[in-house]
Image: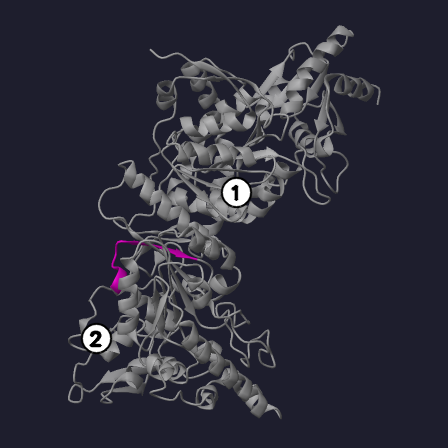
Amino acid sequence: MKSLTKAYRPISWPMLGAGGDTGSWRVHRPVVDVQKCTKCQFCWAYCPEAVIDRHEIIIDYRYCKGCGVCAVECPTGAISMEKEE
Amino acid sequence: MKTAQVIMATGANAAAQAVKYARVDVVPGYPITPQTSIMEYMASMVENDELNARFIPVEGEHSAMAAAVAASAAGARVFTATSSNGLLYMHEVLHMASGGRLPVVMCNVNRGIFAPWTLWSDHQDSMAQRDTGWIQYHCSSNQEVFNTILQAYRVAEQINIPIMVNFDGFAISHCLMPLTLPPQEDIDQFLPPHKPEWRLDPANPSSFSNVTMAAEYAPFRQMLSDDIIASIPLVKQAAQEYKEATGMWDGDTIDTYRLEDAEVVAFAINSMAAELKLSVDILREQGIKAGLLRPRLYLPFPAEDIIAALPQNAQVMVLDRNYNFGHPGGILASELKSVLFGRRNDITVKNRVMGIGGIDLTRRFMAAEIRAMMDE
Amino acid sequence: MTTSIKQLPDTEQVLSGNGACGGCPATMALRIVGKALGPNAIMLLTPSCSVASMGMTPKLGYNWPGINITFATAGSSASGITHALEIMKEKGRLEGELPTVFSWVGDGGTYDIGFQALSAAAERNDNIIHFCYNNEAYSNTGVQRSGATPRGSFTTTTPTGKRQPKKNMALLMLEHNIPYVATATVAYPGDLYDKVVKAKNIPGMKYIEILAPCYLGWQFDMSDTVQMSRAAVRSGAWLLWEAENGKITFNNPTSLIINGKKAAEPVDEYVKKQGRFNRLLKGADSAERIAEIQGDIDREIAFMRERAKITI
């Protein structure tokens, strides 16, 4: 006899958005001023959410929670936090 | 062709020999009387290269079960053993093994529980783990301990439910009896290598036991409950195939003795049930049609087999070596009554608690008790 | 030389859109750990923020196989996995390089309920890395006192500020004679990365503790998480050090403080930035209580300076 429960073991699988579309949590949105950006990658390194492309400094707003660490850590002030509509 | 070998062995040695025959991979262990000698055997078997396994000398039983559960999740065949308060200390992690559907096999060497301290056997420890989602066997001889551990691996790995193999402290764990060791090849055929369908594997990453919402939690629990009951045919099949492989038989879900025409049925588990066979003989000599029904499998409670086996109009004398606190008498009696209710109204159930904290249960004492119960 | 930010690998083991709070320092640290460990690793968690963050069944926000084990057993469970992998490899059932087995556990699961099993795993020198991400409280259950909570800090179970100092957990682990112990914090990702790479390549028990300033528990703006981590190090409230085979070395900027090349910043600055010390600052005895906190830090710096001189 085969166990009926094999599909029922409490298993989880890796995926983006395991917590949902976490961008909807955002109150302030980080906006990058490409003129000021020196591509030092500090924002990428400190981002807890892994939503910043380290080369293009493009932010994935679907998941960015808007914590603002990138804006505070940016040495040239190239990231500003703008209130979400 | 190799033949079986017979040695003199304690129950603890019998358990260790079975673990060796099962080619177990990881054995976390922690000492507690009367289980300690199993862990001593395991440690020396590993040290002496008799068993190619890892012995992990953990710092407590809670960790022993945690290491066993985690090693099982990594894909290993695991074993550990404990007794009494050690089993109680594991309680939380026992749920992890069953809820995680991990086929851990463990021996519990029955011993009464604190307070006050006692070293000797009763069944309060394993009975207190009734609701942890484990399958529980209870054994009445050293040979049965050996045989049952091997059957337990077979069943556990088929249905992904952990199994506790219980036997009495001292009466079994420390007493020498002849032990038949079948050829390893026969056991290898009976118990194939453990190939879990899921394990912690970086090539195919998945995690186990995230927080789970009720809509998914409830079905997990329902399936565990259903599957524990669904293990009964597997238990029977394992006993049957083990018999075909080795010629040895201890009963499947139940074991009976002179039961067919019995009017008075002794109902008990573990070593006292072996002694009760002699009590039955004494009662038969006295002209009482006595018999024995021993649930070898305590959980899942083999309801259908018990209902089918009990003779018409029998008086069943349940001898409990535990207390069912908050109710009169013992736990086995409650279990039996709930099974018979509405199904076998012809049966009378009587109950006594005895042998608590290791009080010796002799054939004459138990025969006299059964006799006295008949008049109640 | 410490690895620079630009030299950190691309590997992402923490997946975007997980359940962590915005600005979570644990997730921030775990990302760097992931870059050092890579995908060939098995993760153990005990109840903590990172379990709440990882997503609910059947969704997982980390790209590792993982097991959520009972709270007290990170040490013994990790031992079970590492022994299982080693014996299965010996028996020919596993091939290739064995995965790194690591625990990712909070300060409660390390300092308090998990201490016994962790101590035993260290004494056995089992081949695992234990990470303690230390946010100095039971943040996941709403910020209660732990053995890592510093003196003076408000938690929901120390409503007038904790009266006892925290224990030096990393030093306790060092005294188990394990081959590698390190402390780190999120403001210094290169330092953390290097320590994890080092630990990964050392057999036996490794312990790495990461100070993780939790804006919710410490009560500051979430965008200041890294700032707070930096302030902790600059004030000497958190010391960066590592010990290979028992020999302690301090890492920058802690080494400058230890060597006396740079004074630690007065703790008031660090304390005043955090709401968790608010009640204490408002009390009539605020000067004494800040002096107590400063005393704890001064003592720890002096003690570690001397302890590092013992190299036998």
C203 lies above or below C172: above
Q: Chain of mark 1?
A: B
Q: In percent of the image, x 44 and y 83: which residue is there?
A: C220
Both marks 1 and 2 on one chain? no
- Mark 1–mark 2 CB contact (< 8 Å): no
**Does residue C20 appear anywhere in the picture?**
no
**Does residue B258 appear anywhere in the picture?**
yes
Q: In percent of the image, x 33 and y 35: which residue is there?
A: B195
Q: Amino acid under label 2?
A: Ser
* Percent x, y of residue B347: 72, 21
Q: Nearer the viewer, residue C167 or B163?
A: C167
Q: Which mark is residue A67?
A: none
B236 lies above or below C258: above
Is residue C111 one of those drawn in magenta? no
Q: Judging from the image, what secondary structure is the residue with disc 1 in?
A: loop
Q: Quadrant of residue B101?
A: top left
Write down the region rendered in magenta: C36-45
Q: Amino acid under label 1?
A: Tyr
C183 lies above or below C202: below
Is residue C44 one of those drawn in magenta? yes
Q: Nearer the viewer, residue C308 or B293?
A: C308
* Percent x, y of residue C259: 35, 82
Q: Which mark is residue C4?
A: 2
Q: Mark 1 highlights which residue?
A: B30
Q: Judging from the image, what secondary structure is the residue with disc 2 in?
A: loop
Q: Quadrant of residue B305?
A: top right
Q: Which quarter of the image is occupied by the C terminus of chain B?
A: top right
Q: Label 2 crowding class (10 Å Cα cut-off): few <14, some 14-19, many 20+?
A: few
Task: Answer left or right for A65 relative to C299.
Answer: left
Q: Which quarter of the image is occupied by the N terminus of chain B?
A: top left
